Image (cartoon, rainbow, N blue to C red):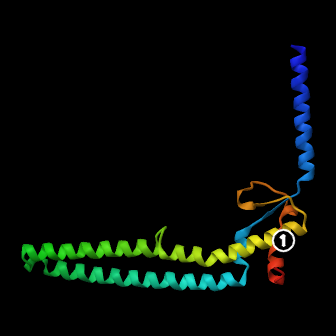
């Protein structure tokens, strides 16, 4: 029993000693890639293009909404004088307008919509450029690892290389 206790104690000490040695060799850094991307001149153009697309989609949706409201008002005024078949046909057309509105909204502005797909497509080259810059700065700073700070609860600000990466990108030394 004493031998088992000694073995466990020795293994525990060896493990903690090894982890401590590993920590001493590991130099970490962190970045805020969102800050870096938003600080890049290329992103400003992408942002303007996306806002233009979004505005265009919203204008189309507003036009569809106005058309729908006009049709509903006309229907309500003429409903009493319409035959049952004409009312049913108009109600079906009004429902089709609502369905078309929802489909357009989802296709353009939804989670799988054109706007988000375009954003992902346009931002991808910037992300790749930022990743390359992060690698270069990490090599220059002799960092073992770089983490995204959005998932860290606390980190010493001395480890933040966000602005070093931005500086690297602005200098254009890729």
Left or right: 62 in relation to 132? left
- The answer to whether 25 is drawn above or below residue 106 in the figure is above
Image point (35%, 75%), residue name? 101
The answer to which quarter of the image holds residue 13 is top right
Residue at position x 42%, y 71% in the image:
106
Image coordinates of residue 146 in percent, x first then y, are 80, 61
Q: How many marks?
A: 1
Q: Quadrant of residue 62?
A: bottom left
**Crowd band around label 1 with a 10 angstrom C-alpha radius: few (<14), some (14–19), many (20+):** some
Q: Which residue is mark 1?
A: 136
Of 6 and 31, which appears nearest the observer? 6
Report which quarter residue 130 is drawn in. Answer: bottom right
Residue 105 pos. (x, y %): 41, 74
Q: Nearer the viewer, residue 80 or 134?
A: 134
Name the quarter where the N terminus is drawn.
top right
Residue at x-position 90% and y-position 40%: 18
Q: Name the foreground residue: 22 vs 54.
A: 22
Q: Position of residue 88 (x, y in %)?
A: 14, 72
Determine the secondary structure under disc 1. Answer: helix
Q: Quadrant of the C terminus?
A: bottom right
Residue 127 locus on image (x, y percent): 69, 73
> Where is 11 relative to 32, above or below?
above
Looking at the image, residue 34 sits to the left or right of residue 172; the answer is left
The structure residue drawn at horizontal position 85% and vertical position 66%, both measured from the top left corner, is 138
């Amino acid at each position: 029993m004493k031998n088992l206790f000694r073995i466990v104690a020795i293994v525990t000490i060896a493990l903690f000693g090894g982890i401590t040695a590993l920590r001493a060799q590991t130099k970490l850094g962190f970045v805020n890639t969102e800050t870096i991307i938003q600080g890049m001149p290329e992103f400003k153009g992408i942002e303007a293009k996306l806002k233009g697309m979004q505005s265009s989609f919203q204008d189309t949706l507003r036009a569809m909404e106005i058309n729908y409201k006009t049709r509903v008002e006309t229907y309500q005024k003429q409903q009493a004088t319409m035959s049952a078949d004409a009312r049913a046909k108009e109600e079906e057309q009004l429902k089709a307008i609502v369905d078309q509105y929802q489909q357009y909204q989802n296709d353009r502005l939804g989670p799988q919509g054109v706007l988000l797909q375009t954003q992902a497509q346009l931002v991808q080259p910037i992300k790749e450029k930022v990743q390359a810059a992060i690698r270069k700065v990490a090599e220059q700073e002799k960092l073992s690892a770089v983490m995204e700070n959005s998932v860290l609860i606390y980190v010493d600000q001395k480890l933040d290389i966000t602005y070093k990466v931005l500086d690297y990108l602005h200098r254009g030394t890729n």
